[in-house]
Image (tube, rainbow, N blue to C red):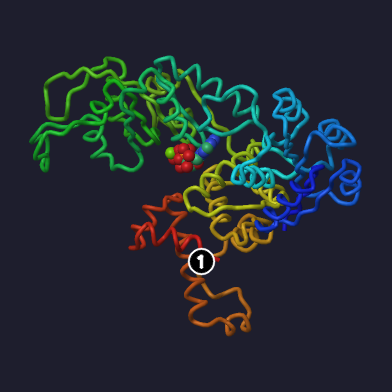
């Protein structure tokens, strides 16, 4: 249970806040003088401090300043006067937020909840507004990447995005589109690895009726569809050599003809590519054309794996948690800071995608609005050791197995199945529901009650 200290000289306010917060399940202590607050704090550090500014025995902000950093809980400053200078000073002194009296109940509870998650550590926020905010990360490596992306997006050049699976290559390609002058134009995507060689050229360049058996009608290719926009060729290393030659030609000459056709069509397309392989090595092995490689590699963007930028784990966790809360419709009230040590220890072979899935899984299985290492051990065992096969009754004692009735077993199996399927579909609830043959609404309801 999270512990909150309320420091306010008005007895009435203390009482109201105490009642409201206790109703929400917090444990609350109050102090009507700063010296009392100090002795409370000397005894224990609460999870959150609500602090009034104007106190009979001193100024709340001076008090805030005097608190030692290491032991300081997050602080929400509440003031009856709403002075902008006070608000600025409070935030500069590291207060989590500044609220004016009278405080709307919902606003207060929302702020309390957010601050409690942060506990003694606030996720870092950059001072400059971040136009690449969809691509979350604050480490030097990511900052460098982002500044490069900003420059690249505006220049109308081909881009090669490299990085291991799940590092955010697809996301970055979309961000480039969003920031580019082609934002009003289409963003067309083709995963070169997902399509057999013989169909790939038809997909890329389209075909005329009768171009091959089965070509019953004319079809436009992805290059044509991407006219005035961006064509994102994902897993570009998987393009066949024949297709590579044609792609190069379109990039250089800005013209193409559909398979089985003679007309030369003009297309204005910017090509953005991604690969999780070392494309230079593919060139050395003769698998990738050198001229195309140089063409694509005008601006290489390299996204480092998550294990090389562990400083981003925490901020990504909060980001995905909020996203999952909204999607699943289930709130989390408290996050035990110990979990971050576990998250940082892990090597993240699936990179950011895996972190996103883990976060969602923790939310789904959380009870009483809490996420901690215990829950982690129950539902994300692979963070501690190698994954175990699912779902089997193995690994449990005979006693445990006998104690389980059919209903419990059914529930356990169902939980694992749903979770497994959710991971398969990258957390997409609509697709998961469809694949399980249930409605999205039903799945959402089930997710809230999973345990
Ligand atoms: N820096 C980031 N900030 C926010 N979300 C991210 C970030 N990096 C990745 N993601 C999310 O993680 C998931 C995986 O990212 P994405 O599909 O772009 O990776 P990828 O590198 O294209 O993977 P693959 O090689 O498997 O295609 C997506 O849901 C994406 O939105
Ligand atoms: Mg991808």
In the picture provided, is 378 more to the left or to the right than 216?
Answer: right
Residue at left offset 85%, top offset 31%: 62
Q: Quadrant of the N terminus?
A: bottom right
Q: Nearer the viewer, residue 402 or 448?
A: 448
**Disc 1: CA contacts within 10 A as few (<14), some (14-19) or many (>=20):** few
Residue at left offset 75%, top offset 48%: 12
Q: Give how far across and how far down residue 206 sits, in percent.
A: 19, 31
Residue at left offset 31%, top offset 19%: 251
Query: SS class of the residue under badge 1?
Result: loop
Q: Which quarter of the picture shows residue 99?
A: top right
Check disc 1 and report the residue beneath it.
Answer: 390
In the picture provided, is 394 more to the left or to the right than 270?
Answer: right
Q: Give how far across and how far down residue 167 sits, in percent.
A: 52, 38
Residue at left offset 58%, top offset 81%: 401
Q: Which quarter of the picture shows residue 220?
A: top left
Q: Quadrant of the C terminus?
A: bottom right
Q: Is residue 165 visible?
A: no
Q: Nearer the viewer, residue 225 or 46?
A: 46
């Amino acid at each position: 249970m999270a512990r909150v200290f309320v420091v306010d000289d008005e007895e009435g306010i203390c009482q109201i806040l105490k009642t409201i917060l206790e109703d929400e399940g917090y444990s609350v202590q109050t102090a009507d003088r700063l010296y009392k607050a100090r002795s409370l704090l000397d005894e224990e550090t609460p999870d959150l401090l609500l602090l009034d500014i104007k106190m009979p025995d001193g100024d709340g902000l001076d008090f805030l300043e005097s608190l030692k950093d290491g032991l300081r809980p997050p602080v929400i400053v509440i003031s009856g006067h709403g002075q902008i200078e006070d608000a600025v000073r409070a935030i500069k002194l590291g207060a989590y937020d500044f609220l004016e009296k009278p405080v709307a109940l919902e606003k207060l509870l929302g702020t309390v909840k957010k601050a409690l998650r942060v506990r003694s550590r606030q996720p870092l926020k950059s001072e400059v507004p971040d136009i690449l905010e969809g691509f979350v990360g604050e480490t030097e490596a990511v900052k460098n990447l982002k500044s490069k992306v900003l420059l690249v997006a505006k220049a109308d050049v081909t881009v090669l995005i490299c990085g291991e699976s799940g590092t955010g290559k697809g996301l970055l390609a979309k961000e480039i589109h969003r920031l580019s002058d082609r934002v009003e134009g289409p963003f067309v995507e083709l995963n070169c690895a997902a399509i057999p060689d013989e169909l790939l050229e038809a997909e890329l360049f389209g075909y005329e009726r009768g171009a091959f058996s089965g070509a019953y009608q004319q079809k436009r290719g992805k290059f044509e569809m991407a006219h005035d926009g961006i064509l994102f060729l994902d897993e570009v290393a998987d393009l066949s050599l024949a297709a590579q030659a044609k792609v190069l030609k379109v990039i250089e000459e800005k013209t193409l003809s559909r398979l089985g056709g003679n007309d030369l069509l003009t297309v204005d397309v910017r090509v953005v590519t991604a690969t999780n392989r070392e494309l230079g090595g593919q060139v050395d092995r003769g698998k990738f054309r050198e001229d195309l490689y140089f063409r694509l590699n005008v601006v290489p963007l390299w996204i480092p794996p998550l294990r090389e930028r562990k400083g981003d784990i925490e901020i990504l966790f909060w980001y995905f948690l909020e996203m999952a809360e909204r999607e699943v419709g289930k709130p989390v009230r408290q996050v035990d800071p110990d979990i971050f040590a576990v998250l940082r220890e892990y090597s993240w072979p699936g990179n950011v995608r895996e972190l996103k899935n883990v976060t969602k899984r923790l939310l789904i299985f959380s009870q009483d609005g809490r996420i901690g290492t215990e829950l982690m051990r129950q539902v994300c065992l692979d963070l501690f050791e190698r994954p175990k096969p699912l779902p089997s009754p193995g690994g449990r004692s005979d006693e445990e197995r006998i104690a389980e009735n059919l209903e419990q077993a059914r529930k356990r199996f169902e939980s694992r199945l749903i979770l497994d399927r959710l991971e398969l579909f990258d957390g997409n609830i609509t697709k998961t529901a469809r694949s399980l043959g249930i409605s999205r609404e039903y799945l959402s309801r089930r997710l809230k009650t999973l345990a």
